[in-house]
Amino acid sequence: MVDFEKLRKKSIELAKKTIRESISEDNFIINSINNIDELTKVANVLTKRLRDWYSLYLPEFSKKISDNEAFVKLIVSRKRKELMQEMNIKESMGTELSAKDLKPIMEIALRINSLYKLKENLKEYLEQVMNSYCKNLSTITGALLGAKLLEQAGSLKKLAMMPSSTVQLLGAEKALFRHLKTGARPPKHGTILQHPLVSSAKKTNRGRYSRVLADKITIAVKTDYFKGKFIGDKLKTELEERLK
Amino acid sequence: MILLDKKFPNIFKDKKNIYTKSLDKKTYFEERTKREGKNVYREWDPKRSKLAAGLIKGISQIGFKEGSIVLYLGASHGYTVSFVSDIIGKNGFIFAIDIAPQVTRDLVRLAEERNNIAPILANCNHPEEYKDTVSKSDIVYQDIAQKNQVQIFLKNCDAYLNSGGFGLLALKARSMDVTKKPKDLFKQVMKELEEKISVVDYRVLDPYEKDHALFIVKKK
Ligand SMILES: C[S@@+](CC[C@H](N)C(=O)[O-])C[C@H]1O[C@@H](n2cnc3c(N)ncnc32)[C@H](O)[C@@H]1O
């Protein structure tokens, strides 16, 4: 007779232990990058609303500062008069607001500003973790893009086992699927497009650049995973040479 | 509340949904419930569970009985496992296997509450990995969405399924080959299965799951 209760007790204990011991930098990195992405989205949505509201007060200013983070930072740190002076706004279509009507606007602005600060702190933390866990990758891609690739692969191990052609198309699964199924044009790059060397390239060069970048990333990640030497700066120089 | 079908124990329906009678009157996945007298019925969502989808699509056999011993491959958070736990009851038992540690936290919590579940972290591509923690079973259920899912399924049926036992394979066409039409792929799988084991029934699971099918096999 099988003693199911004994097997169950043993399995629960073992599973708990395995779950506990499986927690690694991968989890820290994936949670950080997911939260950074989410904070970015939330802060942008809230800032859009804030711009509407603030435009009752000083609409000309919102038009002049398109960057959301800079917009929020400035309105929490400067008075209306100062902003008008600095931006050379002579006359406004907005109106002076009573302290009571201004208060909620400023309160929201302050909260959004602290969301941006939180995001900065998270980025710093992520950079530290990436630099000690996969410095070669992080040197080539920067912490954010490197973390995103790791997140999409699932772990550093999985990313290290991927062929370079798969790395190149991480994040473009939908387009790839469409291509295989319907014969639509194949995607040339996925998340990797965020890399400045690729995104700043001419459109016709992007496919080739992505391939070269994916090759280097693959070498970097394998070296990180197998705890090899630091070759990130060498890879980065080679990359910049080839993509000049 | 009435039985969905006399063949299937502990599975119920009303006009809109299907349910299982909760073994311990508790819920685990924020599922809706219905009470009748002393009983609590847990609503079983076919969009979250391929077994529920198969049942709603009229599958003729599932093999699960009160007291069945089940080897469940790809248990994940344990959503379907929790309903199987209701169906087989307190004299049945489920060996619930998954490979991903952080995904299975809910499964472990469920197993702590339900005496008929053992959570096991292992790769079911290597059945010998868990030979000391599982027993021969009346049913092998697999839902893992991997490229070689058919071979994995057959390996496990070979190693752990009792003769006369049922195997249920939830198949995701996309994870096997995206270039093939799901329909052709299902045909090919059918052939592959039939070389080794007899196929009793199968159902395509849309609209609940796109490009998925549930195969029921029986071991001689
Ligand atoms: C589609 S989900 C299963 C959902 C679950 N059956 C339900 O209905 O609630 C697939 C699961 O299979 C697991 N899996 C994939 N490959 C595996 C393998 N080789 N061994 C064990 N589990 C695996 C994944 O970790 C994932 O949790």
Image (cartoon, helix red, strand yellow):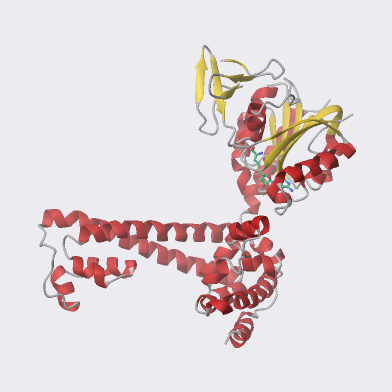
Residue A154, image quadrant: bottom right
Closer to the camera in the image, A29 or B187: B187
Q: Position of residue B143 (x, y in %)?
A: 70, 40
**Image height check: is B134 above or below A229?**
above
Residue displayed at 57% across by 70% down: A192
Residue B205, image quadrant: top right
Residue displayed at 11% across by 57% down: A99
Residue displayed at 61% across by 22% down: B23
Residue displayed at 79% across by 36% down: B134
Q: Quadrant of ligand 1?
A: top right
Quarter containing the N terminus of chain B:
top right
Q: Position of residue B11 (x, y in %)?
A: 64, 21
**Image height check: is B138 above or below A149?**
above
Q: Position of residue B101 (x, y in %)?
A: 65, 48
Horizontal side of B219 relative to A42 (left or right) equals right
Closer to the camera in the image, B126 or A164: A164
Residue lying furthest top: B37
Closer to the camera in the image, B196 or B82: B196
Residue B92, image quadrant: top right
Is residue B172 among what the camera can see?
yes
Horizontal side of B94 relative to A151 (left or right) equals right
**Image height check: is A121 above or below A12?**
below
Q: Position of residue B9 (x, y in %)?
A: 69, 18
Closer to the camera in the image, A243 or A11: A243
**Count of numbered circles in the view:** 0
Quarter containing the C terminus of chain B:
top right
Is residue A128 among what the camera can see?
no
Horizontal side of A173 relative to A7 (left or right) equals left
